[in-house]
Amino acid sequence: MLNLIENTPVRRSKGERTKNLILASTIAVLAERGIKGTTHRAVAKHADIQLSLTTYYFKDIHALVQQAFALNSENLISTLTDLFAPILKLVNQYSKLELRKVSLRVELREQLTELFMALIKTDVSKNRKQLIVEQQFLSELQVSPALHFAAKHYHDVQLVPYLELCQRFSKEKAEINAEQLLMVIKQIQFRQLLPETLSFDIHTTRNLIQHILAIVVNVRAD
């Protein structure tokens, strides 16, 4: 009996590691093959495990894909927190009184533009697969009502740092400005996943960011 109790946590831990491996492999397969190409067999091959293990832990492929979407969203949120830190650090060093100065807001718009350019570049280069899977997740919402709650939660959590930034300049318009800023950044990110001939160039990217940031920091756009 004692041996059984002692061995149980080891088995549970190994099981969790296997499940996490399967989910991580599912994310990779989704990025490479899309939803239609994501099967138990493809996931097992990528994970280099027996097919019976994927079907044991996730009998329904749709449930596996949904859990992979959820994990992918968690990973992107964790990354966003780190990527957004320099942006919030820059703005939070100034008092509300200082942020009323137009000259400072103009300067901040330029500095924030460069920080968002760096955020996009880092995110696309380091999290390309996760962003591709995020696109699939958003597309799947059209035909999978079961994902709506998860999508709403993901959006709300993703919006938090954008809200914190926008509230420093206007509490009344913070929510709408944050929504618009997030939408622009996501649009740019997704375009950067396309072939180079279809993606935004650096000049266009900078202009898009500067335009929306002029609204956020409340200065006249050039």
Image: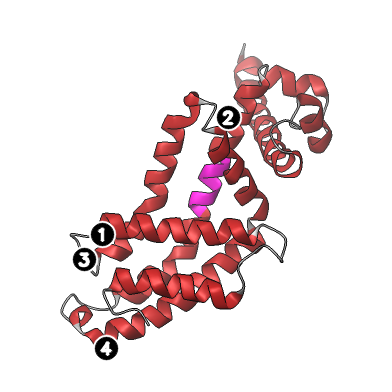
- The residue depicted at 34 percent of the width and 74 percent of the height is 214
N-terminal label among 1 and 2: 2
Q: Position of residue 3 (x, y in %)?
A: 66, 17
Nearer the observer: mark 2 or 4; the answer is 4
- The vertical placement of 56 against 37, above or below, is above
State the residue in front, 189 or 60.
189
Q: Is residue 178 magenta-colored?
A: no
Which numbered disc covers residue 66? 2
Mark 1 and mark 3: Cα distance apart in space: 6 Å
Mark 3 and mark 2: Cα distance apart in space: 37 Å
Quarter of the picture containing the N terminus is top right
Q: Position of residue 152 (x, y in %)?
A: 40, 38
SS at circle 4: helix
The 10 Å Cα crowd at callout 1, few under 14, some 14 to 19, many 20 or more, is: some
Residues at circles 1 and 2 in contact by the CB criterion of under 8 Å: no
Mark 4 and mark 3: Cα distance apart in space: 17 Å
Which numbered disc covers residue 174? 1
- The residue depicted at 74 percent of the width and 31 percent of the height is 38
N-terminal label among 4 and 1: 4
Mark 2 and mark 4: Cα distance apart in space: 48 Å
Question: In the rendered image, which quarter is residue 126 located in?
Answer: bottom right
Q: Amino acid at mark 1?
A: Ala
Q: Which residue is mark 4?
A: 103
